[in-house]
Image: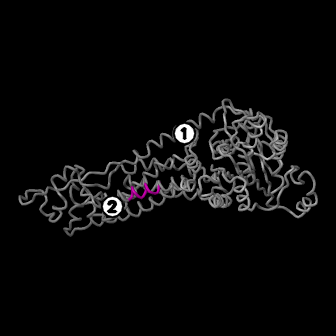
C-alpha cells in the first residue's frame, strides 16, 4: 500500500542511485579508450577502484544531511513537504544516516582492496625489464619533468606513507573504523561519551577526503595524445612509437591525472552543516532561566524553563547542555510541556553517567541553580498527531514524554473549545516497569479525566496503563480493591493492567470502531516494540483506500 511504499521509497531510490553510479563508472573505466594503457597495467582493479570512489563521494555528500536538524525542521514546516509520506521520510533521518554510513564502510573496503592490487601491479610493471608493453609504459617519461608519466612508482619506494593518497587513505580509514565501531548500539547506550567524541572524527574524515585525490596518481591518456596515438592500433608494436621511426604513425602516448573532484561532491553539504553548527551555537548561547526543578520518584528530574523567543509544537525535542557536568556533551530530550504554556519543560530519567550527574547537580541544592544551555526545538513524528482523525499513542517508560505534551495540549484545546481540532479519538497506552514511574504523570491524566467529564467528551480519550513488572503484593492489593472507584496503583479511575497489551486485539478493536478512518500510530519506545506495532499497522490496514489505514510513526533522535 501507499504507506508501505512511502516507507521504502527513499532507501530504494538511494540504492538505485548507488547501483547506477557504480555500474556507469565501472563500465566507463573498463572500456574508455582514454584508460586503455592504464588497464594494461592494472586490469579490472582500475574500474573497481574508480567506481567505488564515485559511490564514496556520493554517500559522503549525503551523510551530513540527515543530521542537519534545523534543515529537517525547516523542511517539515514548509508546505511543499507537508505530505504525510515525505514527512515520514524526514522522521527516519537517523536510520538513513546509518544506512549511508554502512555504504561508506562497504565502498571504502572495496576501494582499499582495489588500490592494494593496483599498487602491487604498478610495482611489478616498474620492476619488469622484459620489454613487455606494461614495462615500456612504466618507463615512459619517467626521467622528464613534463608530468606525462603513467606509472606513479618511479623508484622502489613504499607508497602507502610517502604519497598524499596513501597517507590520507590510511588516516581516513582509521577515522572511519573508530566512528563505525563506536556507533554500535551497545557502546552508544552504555558509553555515550565514547560515541560522542569519536564521532567528531568526521572532521578528519572530510579533510582527508577532500585532499585524497589531489596528487592524481591514477592517470589516463590525454585528449591531445589520443588524436596522435590511437591505443587500440598503436599498442600492437610499442617498439616503433615516436622517435625517428618513419614507419610509425604513433607518437609516444602522454598521460595526465584525473582531476580531484571529491570537494565538488561534499562542498555544499559541508557548508550547510557549518551553517547548522553556527546556528546551533548562536541559539545555545541565548539565556535560559530554570524556573522550577523537581526530582520525582524513580529518579526523574523535571525542569521547567523559560527562554526569550522560544516557540514549540507538540512532541518536539530539544538538546540540553549543562556546563557544570560537561562543556561538550549535548543530549536530546522530548518536551513535556504544551505550546499553550508560558514555559517549556523536560523530564529526564537517570540512564547513564551524564543524566546521573545532572540529577545529582540539581539535588545538591547549591545557592545558585546550575546553568543550562538549550538548542532547539526540533520536529519529530509526534508533531503530526493532530493531523489524524484517530491516534494511537504508545509510550514505554520515560517514552511517555512526547505524549505528555500532546495530552496537555488537548487539555488546553478543550478548555478553550478549539473548533480546529481535527482529532476525534485518542487511544493512549503506557507501559511501565515500576509504579513509581506513574506518579509524575498522574496529575495530568487526572486533570484530563475531569476536563473531559465537564466538557461532555468522556469518550475522546481512551487510556490504558500497563505494569510490566510487579510483585505479588501489588497485584493482590489491586485485585482486592478492584471494585473501588479509583485504581490502587495510580489513584485514577482507569484501572492498571498487569502484563503487556495484546496488540493484535487492540488494533482489531480500533479497526472495528473506526472502519473508514486514517489512524496514526505513534511510538516512543524500544525497537522490538516498534517492529510489533509496524507489523500490526501493515496487517490491519485495508487495501481498500476508502477503509481504515494505520500509519506508523516512531520517535527517532
**How packed is label 2: few (under 14 Cα within 10 Å), some, or many (20 or more)?**
many
**x%, y% of residue 1?**
56, 56
Q: Is residue 252 magenta?
A: no
Q: CA distance from mark 1 to mark 2?
A: 38 Å
Residue lying farthest bottom? 130
First to last magenta residue range: 14-22
| First-in-chain label (1 vs 2) | 2
| Local SS, label 1 | helix
Query: Dot 1 corresponds to which residue?
Result: 276
In the rendered image of this protein, does residue 342 appear above or below residue 157? above
Q: Residue sitting at 62 percent across and 57 percent down? A: 542
- The answer to whether residue 249 is seen in the rendering is yes
Query: Where is residue 245 shown, x and y percent of the image?
Result: 7, 59
> Would residue 357 be visible to someone looking at this image?
no
In the rendered structure, the answer to whether residue 382 lies left or right of residue 90 reads right
Q: Residue furthest left?
A: 246
- Which residue does the numbered mark 2 point to in the structure image? 46
- Furthest residue to the top? 308
Amino acid at each position: 500500500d501507499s504507506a508501505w511504499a512511502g516507507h521504502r521509497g527513499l532507501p530504494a531510490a538511494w540504492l538505485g542511485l548507488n547501483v547506477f553510479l557504480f555500474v556507469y563508472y565501472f563500465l566507463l573505466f573498463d572500456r574508455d579508450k582514454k584508460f586503455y594503457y592504464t588497464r594494461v597495467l592494472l586490469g579490472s582493479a582500475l574500474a573497481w577502484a574508480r567506481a567505488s570512489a564515485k559511490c564514496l563521494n556520493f554517500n559522503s555528500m549525503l551523510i551530513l544531511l540527515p543530521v542537519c536538524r534545523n534543515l529537517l525542521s525547516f523542511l517539515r514546516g514548509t508546505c511543499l513537504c507537508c505530505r504525510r509520506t515525505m514527512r515520514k521520510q524526514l522522521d527516519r533521518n537517523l536510520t538513513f544516516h546509518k544506512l549511508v554510513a554502512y555504504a561508506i564502510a562497504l565502498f571504502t573496503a572495496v576501494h582499499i582492496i582495489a588500490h592494494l592490487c593496483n599498487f602491487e601491479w604498478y610495482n611489478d610493471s616498474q620492476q619488469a625489464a622484459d620489454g613487455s608493453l606494461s614495462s615500456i609504459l612504466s618507463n615512459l617519461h619517467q626521467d622528464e619533468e613534463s608530468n606525462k608519466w603513467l606509472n606513479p612508482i618511479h623508484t622502489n619506494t613504499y607508497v602507502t606513507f610517502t604519497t598524499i593518497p596513501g597517507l590520507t587513505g590510511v588516516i581516513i580509514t582509521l577515522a572511519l573504523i573508530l566512528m563505525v565501531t563506536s556507533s554500535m548500539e551497545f557502546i552508544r547506550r552504555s558509553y555515550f561519551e565514547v560515541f560522542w567524541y569519536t564521532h567528531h572524527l568526521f572532521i578528519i574524515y572530510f579533510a582527508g577526503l577532500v585532499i585524497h585525490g589531489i596528487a592524481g596518481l591514477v592517470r589516463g591518456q590525454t585528449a591531445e595524445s589520443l588524436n596522435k596515438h590511437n591505443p587500440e592500433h598503436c599498442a600492437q608494436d610499442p617498439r616503433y612509437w615516436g622517435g625517428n621511426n618513419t614507419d610509425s604513425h604513433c607518437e609516444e602516448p602522454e598521460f595526465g591525472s584525473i582531476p580531484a573532484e571529491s570537494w565538488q561532491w561534499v562542498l555544499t553539504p559541508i557548508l550547510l552543516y557549518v551553517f547548522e553548527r553556527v546556528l546551533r551555537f548562536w541559539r545555545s548561547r541565548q539565556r535560559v532561566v530554570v524556573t522550577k526543578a523537581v526530582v520525582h520518584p524513580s529518579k526523574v528530574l523535571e525542569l521547567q524553563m523559560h527562554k526569550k523567543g522560544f516557540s514549540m509544537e507538540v512532541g518536539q525535542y530539544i538538546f540540553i547542555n549543562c556546563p557544570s557536568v560537561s562543556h561538550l556533551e549535548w543530549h536530546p530530550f522530548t518536551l513535556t510541556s504544551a505550546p499553550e504554556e508560558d514555559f517549556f519543560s523536560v523530564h529526564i530519567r537517570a540512564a547513564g553517567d551524564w543524566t546521573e550527574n545532572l540529577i545529582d547537580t540539581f539535588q545538591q541544592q547549591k545557592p545558585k541553580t546550575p546553568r543550562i544551555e538549550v538548542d532547539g526545538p526540533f520536529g519529530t513524528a509526534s508533531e503530526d498527531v493532530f493531523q489524524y482523525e484517530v491516534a494511537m499513542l504508545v509510550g514505554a517508560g520515560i517514552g511517555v514524554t512526547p505524549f505528555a505534551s500532546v495530552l496537555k495540549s488537548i487539555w488546553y484545546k478543550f478548555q478553550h473549545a478549539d473548533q480546529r481540532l481535527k482529532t476525534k479519538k485518542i487511544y493512549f497506552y503506557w507501559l511501565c516497569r515500576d509504579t513509581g514511574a506513574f506518579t509524575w504523570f498522574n496529575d495530568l491524566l487526572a486533570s484530563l479525566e475531569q476536563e473531559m467529564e465537564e466538557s461532555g467528551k468522556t469518550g475522546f480519550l481512551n487510556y490504558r496503563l500497563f505494569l510490566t513488572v510487579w510483585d505479588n503484593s501489588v497485584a493482590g492489593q489491586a485485585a482486592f480493591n478492584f471494585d473501588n472507584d479509583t485504581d490502587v496503583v495510580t489513584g485514577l479511575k482507569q484501572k492498571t493492567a498487569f502484563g503487556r497489551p495484546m496488540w493484535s486485539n487492540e488494533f482489531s478493536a480500533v479497526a472495528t470502531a473506526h472502519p473508514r478512518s486514517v489512524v496514526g500510530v505513534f511510538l516512543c519506545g524500544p525497537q522490538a516494540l516498534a517492529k510489533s506495532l509496524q507489523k500490526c499497522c501493515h496487517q490491519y490496514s485495508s487495501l481498500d483506500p476508502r477503509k481504515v489505514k494505520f500509519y506508523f510513526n516512531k520517535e527517532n533522535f
